[in-house]
Image (cartoon, helix red, strand yellow):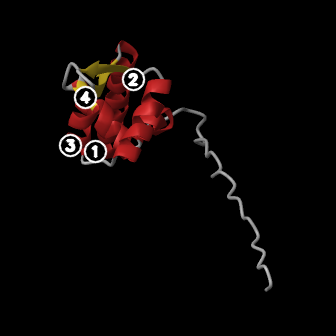
Amino acid sequence: MAVKKTKQVTESPAPVVKPKSGRTSAADSLDNLIHERARLSLISTLAAHNSLSFSELKELLQMTDGNLSVQARRLEEAGYISCEKSFVGRTPRTEYALTDSGRAALKRYVAHMEALIKSMKQG
């Protein structure tokens, strides 16, 4: 029996395009960590609540366990959300909350999006 060899192809990252004017636009300063749809949903939901459990977030956001875990971990590693694990009786409970740093990052993100919208309306 012959073994088929496959060639691994790696993609090079997309080049960063800088504006010709040398100025930084609002789009250039967007927080890409927050800009991803699932993480934006997660951080926005937490901004509207003091804290939410994993189960509550999963239900509100209609995300799978795996996707919610990965996205929450990325935001937690950035310091945007906190995660507290405890037990209620014998049942484990994971509680998430937006940190001050996360709230500030979300405010910056919203301001950048508003600036983009404003510039598009003027153009």
Under circle 1, the secondary element is helix
Disc 1 versus disc 4: nearer the observer? 4
Q: Residue furthest front?
A: 90
- CA neighbours of label 2 inside 10 A, class few (<14), some (14 to 19), many (20+): some
Left or right of 15: which side holds 33? left
Residue 23: give x, y in percent of width and height: 55, 32
Q: CA distance from mark 3 to mark 4?
A: 10 Å
Amino acid at dot 3: Glu
Under circle 4, the secondary element is strand
Q: CA distance from mark 2 to mark 1?
A: 24 Å
- In percent of the image, x 35 and y 16: which residue is there? 99
- CA neighbours of label 3 inside 10 A, class few (<14), some (14 to 19), many (20+): few
Dot placed on the residue nearer the N-terminal end, 1 or 4: 4
Residue 68: give x, y in percent of width and height: 36, 41
Amino acid at dot 1: Lys
Amino acid at dot 2: Ala
Q: CA distance from mark 3 to mark 1?
A: 36 Å
The residue wearing badge 2 is 105
Judging depth in this view, the residue of 71 and 65 nearest the camera is: 65
Dot placed on the residue nearer the N-terminal end, 2 or 4: 4
Q: Quadrant of residue 34?
A: top left
CB atoms of marks 2 and 4 within 8 Å? no
CB atoms of marks 3 and 4 within 8 Å? no
Q: Which numbered disc covers residue 121?
A: 1
Q: In this view of the protein, can residue 31 be seen by the observer? A: no
Left or right of 117: which side holds 105? right
